[in-house]
Image (cartoon, grey):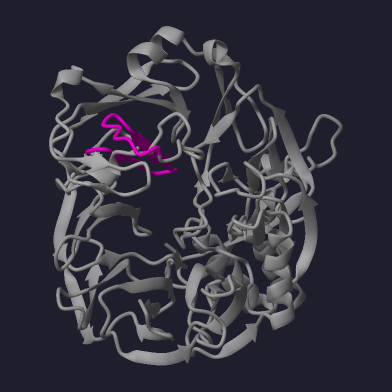
């Protein structure tokens, strides 16, 4: 993977001729040692002899070469911006595969464009119906799937859907603090119960031929939901109802449940190709003894609007949260995560005692909240990599420049430990907190925040030594989302009491405050969302990185910031 040359070091250019005829262009790519090879190449002609026009952004990524070409032209013209241009091109290209990438967060972000309309379920939106699809933001709006160009806010395309549509996998979450990963395909299911159809949608708006879902499959395997990697998921309880033993569990209509459901039915989760209908894999998740409160109101069919608590036990109740890289089942007697390839990640937790997170370096971490804490790290293939004490996490945003790193606390919550991706400890330092938020890894700096602490700290990624410390208490209580351009870190903070969100940008290497959003601007952003809500509804506002741009998404619209 190419690395940025150190500031002040020499750049060596190897000139290579290209012997094909035609109009000439140039390109450059930095090597691992910081040298750059400049290549002359032929621009293809079309039938009329004119150079081909670059494809539209949705169809390719031609524009990503612009910084590199500009740098090469600067060399030819003898200007002094060549080195910076090549370094910027290398930095930007390297970061595109990492979460939280934005081209520039060093200067204040202000409104560039606005798209007004319902996103997902509207004002009460929870993020489930939106995703970063290639280089566009795609989301349900009424009975349509809409895609916006993140640079301009213009509609890239609209795909009409049928009645009761559901699209996925879930890509945007207001609750996780991680940036939305890009997906290569969305799956949409729509239509009346007996006539539901499924289509897949590509980043350029290409739609597959509709496939009618067989009602008999629904009866045998459960209702269809959009899944990851172009799949349709089905799930149902299996086995005789006589397996259910409510034990001493009891719920009251006035609220509250007690006791334990001691036995119940397993869950069968099945994935089929959205286009072909072919079964790809099936996983059986066994029932585990469950507290009564877990057996009340989860719903597989209505993940965004489950049934209200009715004071009764529902031993077959379960639901799922389907994201780009995980299917997480929850409900009565079940707490499980399944990879897109059908591997069950199961360290045998008790239901309701943990959850799984995707890791930026790759793989997954199962955080078990029983006792002093425990983390099971899995590889992308679902194999156990290491079983660690404490809570271990990867960075929310990263630039890919430093070594793959996981951070976690020891069992006592008194020390912070850095691990390589394979779980080998690299260093540990004293830092008191049962949980750490690994906000970003930028260059040789790890940006962390202790749960319940008001300080954000920059630590040397190689030694753990503190480089800087910044007090967030004047701007917020917790970072909701984190982004980086490879030099600065953008934190989206929330004030717990008021719900106001504020953007703050720090130099990753020094901790210097580069800019902060004004009180007036921060308050106006949340008030604009509140205006469309009922009194009992909480405003949901999330920042999303799409193709290097920051978008502000709520249930009532989208704003482009830049």
Residue under the image location 31 percent in, 49 percent down: 256
Q: Nearer the viewer, residue 82 or 431?
A: 431
Q: Quadrant of the N terminus?
A: bottom left
294 relative to 439 in the view: left or right? left
Q: Is residue 536 left or right of residue 477?
A: right
Question: Can residue 364 be seen here?
Answer: no
Q: Position of residue 440 (x, y in %)?
A: 43, 72
Horizontal and vertical percent position of residue 221:
34, 17
Q: Where 456 falls versus 262 (above or below)? A: below
Question: In the rendered structure, does residue 400 fall within the stretch colored magenta?
Answer: no
x and y percent of residue 421 in the render?
25, 62
Residue 167 left/right relative to 390: right
Residue range (magenta):
310-336
Q: Quadrant of the C terminus?
A: bottom right
Vertically, is 197 above or below 358?
above
Residue 482: tell me if it is visible.
Answer: yes
The number of numbered badges drawn on the structure is 0
Give the vertical position of 107 relative to 117 (above or below): below
- Residue at 49% from the left image edge and 38% from the top image edge: 169
Q: Point out residue 530 in the picture as x, y percentages from the top left corner.
A: 69, 61
Q: Nearer the viewer, residue 46 or 197?
A: 197
Task: Specify whether 286 is left or right of 520.
Answer: left
The answer to whether residue 311 is magenta is yes
């Amino acid at each position: 993977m190419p690395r940025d040359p150190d500031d002040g070091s020499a750049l060596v250019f190897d000139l290579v001729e290209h012997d094909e005829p035609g109009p000439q262009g140039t390109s450059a790519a930095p090597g691992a040692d910081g040298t750059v090879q400049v290549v002359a190449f032929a621009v293809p002609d079309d039938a009329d002899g004119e150079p081909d026009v670059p494809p539209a952004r949705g169809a390719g990524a031609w524009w990503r070469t612009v910084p590199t070409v500009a740098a090469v032209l600067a060399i030819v013209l003898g200007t002094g911006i060549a080195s910076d241009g090549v370094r910027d091109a290398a930095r930007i290209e390297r970061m595109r595969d990492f979460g939280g990438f934005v081209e520039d967060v060093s200067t204040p972000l202000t409104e560039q464009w606005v798209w007004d309309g319902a996103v997902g379920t509207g004002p009460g939106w929870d993020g489930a119906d939106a995703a970063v699809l290639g280089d566009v933001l795609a989301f349900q709006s009424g009975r349509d799937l809409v895609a916006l160009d993140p640079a301009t806010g213009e509609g890239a395309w609209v795909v009409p859907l049928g009645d009761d549509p559901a699209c996925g996998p879930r890509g945007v979450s207001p609750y996780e603090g991680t940036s939305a990963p890009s997906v290569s395909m969305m799956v949409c299911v729509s239509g009346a119960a007996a006539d539901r159809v499924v289509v897949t949608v590509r980043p350029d708006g290409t739609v597959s031929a509709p496939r009618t879902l067989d009602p008999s499959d629904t009866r045998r395997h459960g209702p269809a939901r959009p899944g990851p990697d172009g799949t349709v998921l089905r799930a149902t309880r299996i086995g005789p109802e006589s397996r259910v033993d409510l034990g001493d569990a009891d719920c009251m209509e006035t609220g509250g449940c007690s006791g334990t459901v001691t036995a119940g039915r397993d869950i069968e989760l099945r994935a089929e190709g959205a286009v072909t209908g072919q079964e790809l894999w099936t996983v059986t998740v066994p029932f585990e003894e469950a507290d009564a409160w877990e057996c009340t109101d989860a719903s597989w069919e209505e993940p965004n609007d489950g049934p209200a608590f009715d004071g009764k036990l529902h031993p077959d109740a379960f639901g799922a949260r389907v994201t780009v890289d995980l299917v997480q089942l929850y409900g009565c007697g079940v707490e499980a995560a399944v990879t897109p390839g059908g591997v069950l990640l199961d360290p045998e937790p008790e239901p309701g005692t943990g959850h799984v997170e995707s890791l930026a370096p790759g793989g997954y971490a199962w955080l078990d909240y029983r006792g002093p804490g425990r983390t099971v790290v899995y590889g992308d293939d679902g194999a156990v990599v290491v079983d660690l004490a404490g809570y271990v996490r990867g960075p929310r945003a990263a630039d890919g420049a430093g070594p793959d790193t996981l951070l976690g606390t020891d069992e006592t919550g008194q020390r912070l430990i850095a691990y390589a991706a394979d779980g080998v400890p690299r260093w540990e330092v004293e830092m008191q907190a049962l949980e750490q938020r690994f906000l970003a890894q930028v260059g040789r700096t790890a940006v962390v925040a202790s749960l319940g602490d008001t300080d954000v700290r920059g630590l040397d990624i190689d030694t753990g030594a503190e480089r800087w410390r910044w007090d967030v208490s004047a701007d917020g209580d917790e970072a909701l989302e984190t982004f980086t351009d490879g030099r600065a870190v953008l934190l989206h903070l929330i004030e717990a009491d008021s719900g106001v969100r504020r953007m703050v940008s720090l130099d990753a290497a020094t901790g210097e405050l580069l800019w902060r959003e004004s009180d007036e601007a921060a308050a106006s952003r949340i008030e604009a969302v509140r205006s469309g809500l009922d009194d009992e509804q909480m405003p949901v506002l999330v920042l999303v990185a799409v193709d290097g741009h920051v978008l502000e998404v709520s249930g009532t619209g989208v704003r482009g910031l830049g």
